[in-house]
Image: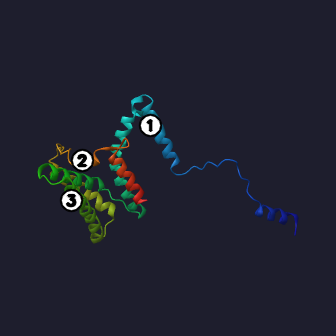
Amino acid sequence: MTASDIASDAKRHAVPRQLPWPRWRWSEDTGLIIVFVLMVLAIGIPHPEFFSFGSIKTILRQSALVGIIAFGMVYLVAMVEIDLSVGGIFAVASSLSALLIKFHHVDPWIAVALALLAGVVLGGLNGVLTSVLKVPLIIVSLGTLSAYFGLHLILSDGKAIYGLPKSHPFFQIFGSDLLQLPASVWTAIVCAIVLY
């Protein structure tokens, strides 16, 4: 055994030196987080009211629904698919529930259940069209996106639907705050935990 063999054998069995602190690793998300923090600072420094609790609460309320939709999209992306029509499905389901409550006096619990069923049917239609036509989902959902937004405009007549019964328990629960956070944010957190 030569000296070089002994040296190479010692290198193979040497224990790597441990640093007293964890090494920084640049992950795929690090750049995104840095850009996000820079954007928040670029908006918040000239406009300090952006950092107020009311402003943050409003942003969380508005982004909770998008977050809930995004949680479902994770499964499609994991299967190397993407559905572009989820915004149209959301628009149809929300306008359908509002119309049922406002003009047909359907109980909000039932109206929301019917809207969720409509969302399942529209999403299922995408799946059926993809299977029958042997076309990638991205192509099918690109077409149904326009169709679903058109259906939403037909249902709502292109107008906002307002005047819903805010005194109903459904709106008291899902339109209220719990521990200073909107119920939609808590719903998004529960969805994230369940779908994880």
Q: Position of residue 36 (x, y in %)?
A: 46, 42
Name the secondary structure under disc 3: helix
Query: Does label 1 or label 3 sit earlier along the sequence?
Result: 1
| Colouring convention used in this rendered image of the protein | rainbow
Q: Quadrant of the C terminus?
A: bottom left
At label 2, counting other C-alpha atoms closer than 10 Å, the crowd grade (few under 14, some 14-19, many 20 or more) is some
How far is the residue under mark 1 from the one under mark 3?
A: 39 Å
Please give the label number shown on residue 40: 1
User: Is residue 166 positioned above or below 78 on the image?
Assistant: above
Q: Quadrant of the N terminus?
A: bottom right
Residue at position x 20%, y 48% in the image: 168
Instruction: Assess whether mark 3 and mark 2 are in contact (beta carbons under 8 angstroms).
Output: no
Q: Position of residue 47 (x, y in %)?
A: 40, 29
The kind of residue tagged 1 is: Val
Please give the label number shown on residue 171: 2
Instruction: Assess whether mark 3 and mark 1 are in contact (beta carbons under 8 angstroms).
Output: no
Q: Position of residue 120 (x, y in %)?
A: 26, 62
How far is the residue under mark 2 from the one under mark 1?
A: 32 Å
- Of discs 2 and 1, which sits in the foreground? 2
User: Is residue 82 positioned above or below 39 on the image?
Assistant: below
Q: Residue furthest left?
A: 104
Residue at position x 46%, y 34% in the image: 41
The kind of residue tagged 3 is: Leu
Where residue 71 sits, quadrant-wise, is bottom left
Name the secondary structure under disc 1: helix
Towards the viewer: 192 or 77: 192
Name the secondary structure under disc 2: helix
Q: Residue furthest bottom?
A: 132
Residue ID for mark 3: 114
| Whether residue 47 can be seen here | no
